Image (tube, coloured by chain):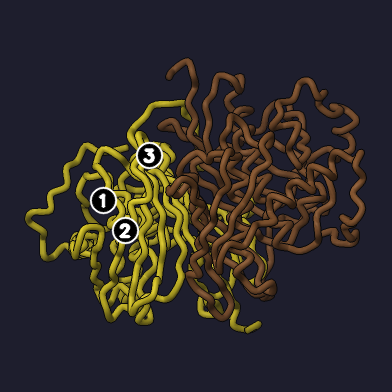
Chain colours: A yellow, B brown
Amino acid sequence: MSSSTTADLTVPDESDTGQLLADRLLALLDLESIEKDIFRGRHLGDQNPNGHVFGGQVAAQALMAAGRTVDTERAVHSLHAYFIRAGDASVPIVFTVDRIRDGRSFTTRRVVAIQHGHAIFALEASFQLDQPGVDFQATMPDSPAPETLLAVTGPIAPGEQSDFEAGLPFEILRVPPADPPPARRTNLQWLRATGRLPDDPLTQACAFTYASDLFPGSAIVETLGIDYTDLRMASLDHAVWFHRPGRADDWLLVESESMSASGSRASVTGRVFARDGVQVATIVQELMIRVSSTD
Amino acid sequence: MSSSTTADLTVPDESDTGQLLADRLLALLDLESIEKDIFRGRHLGDQNPNGHVFGGQVAAQALMAAGRTVDTERAVHSLHAYFIRAGDASVPIVFTVDRIRDGRSFTTRRVVAIQHGHAIFALEASFQLDQPGVDFQATMPDSPAPETLLAVTGPIAPGEQSDFEAGLPFEILRVPPADPPPARRTNLQWLRATGRLPDDPLTQACAFTYASDLFPGSAIVETLGIDYTDLRMASLDHAVWFHRPGRADDWLLVESESMSASGSRASVTGRVFARDGVQVATIVQELMIRVSSTD
C-alpha cells in the first residue's frame, strides 16, 4: 500500500474543493465524547439525500465510535451491521459502545446508533493485534488506469449532479463494461477520497467504510439496466472484511458482483484492490430493491 | 425447491442411524422456554469436539431463539454473527433475544448466547414478509451427482471418523478437485441432513445454519493443502444470506471459494444451490488460522 506521502491538513487551500470535502468527512468522524463509551456525531446537511442520513456516514461514525474504545495497536479486521431505521439528518446521532470482549488477540465491540429513542443502526466490529500467517488473495481484474478514465469521461458537470453527489468526499470512476459483458454480473469502479486523509489506520478504515455503502446500489442498477429513478433501494445490512491495510485516499479498484436478487432483495459482493494489486477488503451488502412499476 | 415429500417423523426406525442423528439435531433446536425472549439450549456431548460447543450448533440454536419471537409468516433472509468465546459443552447455553424492530416488512432480532455470565456468541438476524421482485442468481457449477460420489467414495469407515464426525447430523460428499485446479480457489461439496426434517422453513433454515459452519474450514484446508492436524482454526464470524427457500434434508451443492488469507485470518464464501440449480443461500465466514509450525 502506498503510505509514502504524509497528509498535510494544516493549511487547507480554500480553493481546493476536493480537500474541503475530505475535511468535512474528517469532521463527521470527529465524534464528540459525551461519556465513557457514549459519543455524538453531527451531520453536514447537504451530504444527506432526502433528509435521511446517508448509511455510509452512520456506518463510518459507528466504526469510529468502536475504534475509539480499542487500543490503537489493534486494527479493525471485520464489521457486520444492520440498517434498522432511516436516520434523521436534522438531529445528531448518539452512539453507545458495548465492550463485548477484550481478548488476548481479538477485541469485539458493538455499537448502537440512536435517534429519537430508537436504534437506527447496529454494528459489531472485531479488532486484532497484527499477527503473521499464511497469505493468499483474489486476483485483481484487468482495468484501465484511473487517469485514463479521467481523461475519457471527465468530471461530471456540476449542473448534472445532485447536491448529495456534489458533496461526496469521494470521486468514483466507472470502468466501461466489457463487450460482451462478463459471465458473472460484475462491474468495475475506481474510488478515491477527494483529498488527503490522515495516515492513521482507523481513520482510513472509517473513510473506506463511508464509501463502501456507495457502490452496491450502483452495481445493482447496472446489473438490472433499469433507470435509477424507477427503483427504490435501501441498504439492509453491510459487512466489510478488512483483509490488509489500505488507504481510502489513494485509488482503489472495486470489483462488484451482483450475487442474487429475489423477494425484493438483492445482494452484492465487492472485492477491493489497491493500485498495486493488493486485496485490501471484501464487502457484502444486501439491499431492499423495489421497482416502481411493480409496486 | 423440492417440497413434495412430507417428512414422517412419527415412527423413527431405531435401526436408522441417520434418522436418529437428524432427530438429535431437532432435539438441539427444541429450545426450552425460560421466560419471554429467554431460551435454554442443551447439548449432546459427543457432537462437540474437545469439550467445546460446535459453532454451528450455537448459531442454529440462536437463530431458532430469534425465530421463536417472530411471526411465522416472516422468513429469515439474513444473519450475521460473531463467535466471542469458546462454548462449554458441559453446561447449557442461555439465549436472550432483543426485539430490535418489528417493521411493516422487516423484523430484526439480536440474540446473545450466554454461559458462565459471559456472552459466548452474538447473532443478529432479519426476517421479511414474502414480497415478489426482480430475480437473478449465480450459475450452479457443474458437478457429478451425489449418488455417483456415494458409489465412488463410499461412506467413511466408522473407525476412521472422529466421534464428532460420526455424530454429525449431516453427510458431506467432497467432489474430487478438477485437474487442473480452477483459477479461483473453489471446491465443491454436497451436503444433506442424515434424515428427514420437518417442513417448516425456520427449522430447515436452522438446520442449514448448523451445517454452514462445517465447510469453510475444510475449504481452507483444501486450498492450503496442509494436513488438518498442522492447523489450529476457529470460526471468527459468520454470515448467511437465505436467498430463497431451501431444504437442508435434500442435497445441496456448496461451492466454496477461499477469498483471502492474511494476518492469521482466512475468509471463505460459499454459494449454495439446490439440486435443481436454485441458489438458496450464500455464506461468508472468516476464520482464525494458525499453522503449528509457525506458532
- Determine the secondary structure under disc 2: strand
Q: CA distance from mark 1 to mark 3?
A: 13 Å
Q: Is residue B73 left or right of residue B153?
A: left
- Looking at the picture, does residue B237 appear above or below residue B10? above
Residue B7 vs residue A78, the one in the foreground? B7
Question: Which numbered dot is residue A106?
Answer: 3
Q: Quadrant of residue A38?
A: bottom left
Q: Quadrant of the C terminus of chain B?
A: top left
What residue is drawn where x is 50% and y is 38%? B86
Chain at numbered mark 2? A
Q: Earlier in the sequence, mark 1 or mark 2?
A: 1
Q: Residue furthest left?
A: A11
Image coords of residue A288 (percent x, y): 55, 71
Within 10 Å of disc 3 (Cα), the crowding (few <14, some 14-19, many 20+) is: some
- Determine the secondary structure under disc 3: strand
Q: Quadrant of the N terminus of chain B?
A: bottom right
Q: Earlier in the sequence, mark 3 or mark 2?
A: 2
Image coords of residue A156 (percent x, y): 35, 68
Residue that numbered label 1 is attached to: A69
Q: Is residue A224 left or right of residue B252?
A: left
Pointers 1 and 2 in contact (C-beta within 8 Å):
yes
